[in-house]
Image (cartoon, rainbow, N blue to C red):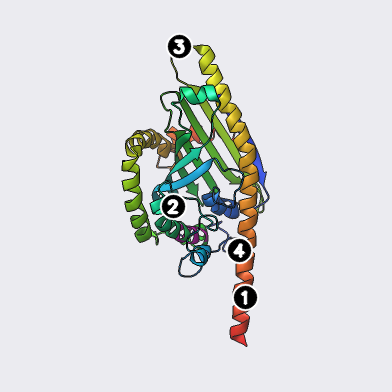
Amino acid sequence: MSRPGVAPDPPINLEVDDEGTHREERKTGGNRSEVTMSASLAPECNEVKERYDSCFLKWYSEKYLRGKGTTDECANLFKDYKKCLTGALKERGIDKMLEEAREDHKENDAQHMRRGCKTLCGPFNSYMED
Amino acid sequence: MKVFSNEESFDYSWEEVSTANWRKYCPWNDKSTHVIAVDTLSRSVDTTTGILRTERLITCKQSAPKWLASLMGGTDISQVFETSYVDPESKKVTMVSQNLTFANIINVRETVVYQPLSAARTQFKQEAQITALCGGWQKVKTAVEDATVTRFRENAVKGKEGFESVLEMSRRVFSEEKSRQNQSTEKMAL
């Protein structure tokens, strides 16, 4: 996924170490006031979420934005987080609400994913620039 | 229907802004405290376009005016569903979101776009369409829409301030990290 026009080394901010673990989290044992990621709606998922978020942020800034991010290296961590979250959403009855919203949002994909619909989506693509 | 729109600029590169945006609501942001949780539901990179598509669930806790709270069943927790698209080729982040909670009373659809203004400046554009759905009384609908627009305006100010501190902290931590790495490289060289 090499792209022309992508700056080779943009200034990127990171404070995740090489193991993908969060420095602050390690130091404080996961004290929410010390961590630098947002919380999960399910407190029991905070730990796996933090691990996934840190991994993603590192991948996003170091690989994806530099045109080297074709594979999702955090897939395994996401699986753990997702497993925890799915149960929590079900428990809270949010899963059904989500399904409906998800259907609604499929319309947005045509507009924002540029999937061979240049003529169809052309007029809509530019509405934010007006 | 009411429309709320807002435009801001940040003195940071698009790469910095789009990275920090993933943790806009972390504890470094002490202004947007109404956002209590952000969960990622799905994430994928489109193989043809390279666009990163993410679905998130955003949980807010915000006390509404008393009359509105009673209309909304007394709960102060609400949830928003967001789909975002990052196009690294054209350097554009687009985030589309809608309310999940109170969907029978009000429909809020928001679009946020981050695009570079220059190598060191990024533009933030926000537009929200707010439509009250509660039957019959126009007066009630208008009041609900107005209250929501007011809330958007308040949150927009806090959002800008809060995100500025996240950007600042991100840059500081990054440079600290970098100098530490340089130091250890120097030590190794000795």
Mark linked to residue B174 = 4
Which residue: 53% across, 63% down? A24
Density class for disc 1 (Cα within 10 Å; few <14, some 14-19, many ≥20) is few
Amino acid carrying label 1: it is: Asn
Q: Can residue B47 be seen by looking at this rendering?
A: no
Is disc 2 in the same subunit as disc 3? yes
**Residue assigned mark 2:** B50
Q: Distance of mark 1 from mark 4, alpha carbons?
A: 12 Å
Q: Can residue A44 be seen by looking at this rendering?
A: yes
**Residue assigned mark 1:** B182
State the SS at label 4.
helix
Q: Is residue A126 magenta?
A: no
Q: Distance of mark 2 from mark 3, alpha carbons?
A: 47 Å
Q: Distance of mark 3 from mark 1, alpha carbons?
A: 67 Å
Chain of the residue on which disc 2 is drawn: B
Query: Is B4 positioned to the left or the right of B49 in the image?
Result: right
Q: Which residues are magenta?
A: A55-61
